[in-house]
Each structure stands twice: as structure tokens, then as C-alpha cells.
Image (cartoon, rainbow, N blue to C red):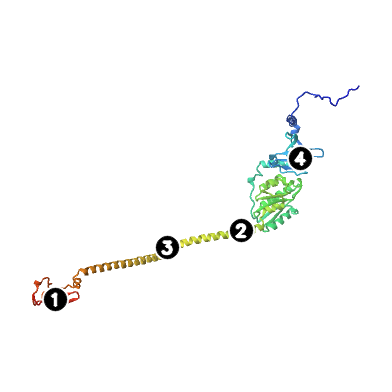
Amino acid sequence: MPEQLSLFAQVRPVSQAQPYTVSQLTGYIRGLIEEDPVMADVWVEGEVSNFGQASSGHAYFTLRDAGAEIGCVMWRNVLRQHTFLPTDGDQVLAHGRVGVYELRGRYQLYVDRLQPAGTGSLYLAFERLKARLESEGLFASERKRPLPPMPRCIGVVTSPTAAALQDILNVLRRRYPLAEVLLAPTQVQGEEAPEQIVAALEALNRRDDVDLIIVARGGGSLEDLWAFNDERVARTIAAARHPVICGVGHETDYSLADFAADVRAPTPSAAAELAVPDRGELRTYVAQLGAALTATVAQMVARHRQTLNIYARTLEHLSPLSRLAQSRQRVDELSSRSETLLRHRLALHRERVRGLAGRLKAVSPIGTMERGYAIVYRRDTGDVVRSVEQVAAGDLLRVQVGDGEFEAEVTHG
């Protein structure tokens, strides 16, 4: 009979080797991948999906084609070095190394270079030239100059038939029609474009009436915008006598001209808006300035008027007429006080004299005589009779009483 297999038979391990832990197995696979030199330097082409930046600044996305997909990571420091950032659906070439993210057990591409697919050689040339010029300090922020607040003459380097020129003119007319526009016509695409752009910039640099230069072109592919990645153009912009605004392409397009310019604008229209103030805002600013100036002048006038009043009072106080008036007032005050004092003292003396007079009257002979006494004089000698022995019968006498005198004769003695 043929041997029959039992469904309940014990299954024996083929090998008695110890099993791996998940971490051990993942680490082993990671080692195999990271030690492979091919995986350390690889280019991958695919379509971008789920591109996004975390709050940490790192970017995460997926590259895929019809048959597979691979997760990709761009660290923050790598991302900062790139002017090209993809959007979902873009075909790109990504360079980097393949590694394993052990926590999730998946392999992924750590990207250090990213460029649009189909522009590989141009993009690499762009990156190499950008790195060289950057190392020379051509793009350094300290080289950037501020824009004039109200330019009188704006030089524009672009094609005379380009829509970019009309966009710039429309914005300038709307925002600041006082500005004069000086067009330096040039090709903005093709083999002759770089040389013409340089010539246009140099022509504007020779003029003293130009305050600001706008270099502009509409959007296009990397090949269409390549004239603005020319080294001669970048160096001429960096060495320009006047401040330069570069408005080439669309918001996602970057060129070496953008890096060399004093200010980069995402579009030609945006370049025009950056170049001039808005006249409505200027009106508001002038009105605010006028109000502030009026208030300041009013404060100054009030402050100076107060100071003048103080000086006037001081001068009035120190003037000879003022001093004379004050002296007169002082004399009047002293005279009045003296008169009052004299009157007071005179009244006191009068009262004192009255008192003394009363006392004198009380003790004087007249006062005594008024009380009934008399003074007797001898008529012949005028002597005062103080004793009866001084008179004899028949002597004539003069008797003085309080209210007068009379004569008398002694009848007996």
C-alpha cells in the first residue's frame, strides 16, 4: 500500500538553526543593501506622488511607475540646496542611496539630487555653474542693494513683442504712472539671447538717468529660459550699476539671473509691482505725513509760544520801566506805611500828652486854685504872701484865683 500522509502528523523543522528576531532580520537586510556599492549611488526615474514637507523641514514623497513604487526622503539641508521642487505627477530623476527604515521594515531612497526628467544634462550644468558662482560670493545677500522707493526712470530688458512687456507697462501705468520706462530690446530665447541681454544691460548701465532695471521674460521650459542661466548674464546682472529686479518665468522657475539680481520676482508683473509704489498707498502716506507734519508744527508753535511768553514776562520784569514802576509802588507802600505809623505814634503821643497835662493840671497852682485856693501877692513888691506877718492893715494885695485875679486891702492885721 502506498504511504499515506496524516493530516495530524507532527511537522518537524527542516533545520535546527535559531530563529531571527524581526530586528535582526531587518538589520541583516539593511546591511546587505547598504553594503552594496550599486545601492549607494543610484539614479531612479519615476512619477512623483504624495510630495509634502514635514514641520521638521524634511520632504517625503513616492516615486512610482506602472509596475512598482519606492518611498523617498529628502533631508532639510538637501532640500535647501534645490531650486526645483516637484509637484505630484511630475516625472523626475532622483539620485541618492537606497537604505532601510527599520521601524517600518521598508526600503527607501534617500535623495540628494532631484531634477526634472528629460533635462538631465542641462540641469546638471545649471547646478554646477550655480555652485561655482555661489562659491565666488556672486549671490551673497550682503551684495544685494535696496530698491529706490520712487524711481523716476525704469530700464526694462525684454523682448519688445513679449507679453511680459505689456504686463509690466500695465502694472506701472496702474500703480505709478509718473515713472518713465526705457526699453532695452533683446531676444529672450535662443543662442543669440545671452549676448543681447548682456548688451542691453550694459547700455542701461551707461545711463545716468536710470534708477532701476527690470529683467523680464514669461514662463517656459528649462530650455526656453536657458539664456538667463548663462554665466555672462549672471555676472553682468551682479555687476550692474543700478539695482536689478529679475522677473523671469513663473513662480516655480528659478534661473541664475534670479540669484544674481538684487531682488527676485516670481513673474514680470510682480517685478513691476516691486519696482514702484502704489499711487493709492502714496496718497494715503502723503495724507498721513501731512497730518503728522501739521501736528508737529502745531506742537512746535505752541512750545515756542510758551517759551516766548516766559521770556516776555522775564523781560518785562527786568525792564527799567518795570523796575521804576515796582520802585514807585514800593515807595508808595513805604510812604503809606510811614504815614500810618506816624499817625499812630502821634495819636499815642497826644494821648500821653493829654495824660501828662491832666496830671500836671491836677498838681499845678491853677488846678489848686480852681479847687478854691488862691495866691496872694503884695501889690507893691509882687512878693507872694506866705504868712500873715508879711502884711499889715492898709496894705494893698493882688489875689489870683482859678479864673482870674482881683485886688484887696488889708483892713486889720
Q: Is residue 351 left or right of residue 21?
A: left
Kindly report which numbered mark, 4 or 1, lies closer to the viewer in this rendering: 1
> Alpha-carbon distance for marks 4 and 3?
92 Å
> Residue tagged by mark 4?
62
Please report contact status of discs 1 and 3: CB closer than 8 Å, yes or no.
Answer: no
Regarding residue 37, the answer to whether it shows in the image is yes
Residue 398 shows which numbered tag? 1
Helix or strand or loop: what does disc 4 sit on? strand
Residue drawn at (59%, 60%) of the image: 291
Residue 288 shows which numbered tag? 2
Check disc 1 and give the amino acid type.
Arg
Please report contact status of discs 4 and 3: CB closer than 8 Å, yes or no.
Answer: no
Name the quarter where the C terminus is drawn: bottom left
Helix or strand or loop: what does disc 1 sit on? strand
Question: Where residue 157 sits: x, y (%)?
Answer: 71, 52
> Residue tagged by mark 3?
317
Q: Which corner quadrant of the image does residue 363 belong to?
A: bottom left
Check disc 4 and give the amino acid type.
Thr
Q: Is residue 332 left or right of residue 138?
A: left
Q: Which tag, 3 or 2, sits closer to the chain's start?
A: 2
Kindly report which numbered mark, 4 or 2, lies closer to the viewer in this rendering: 4
Up/down of 369 relative to 299, above or below: below
Towards the viewer: 296 or 38: 296
Check disc 2 and give the amino acid type.
Gln
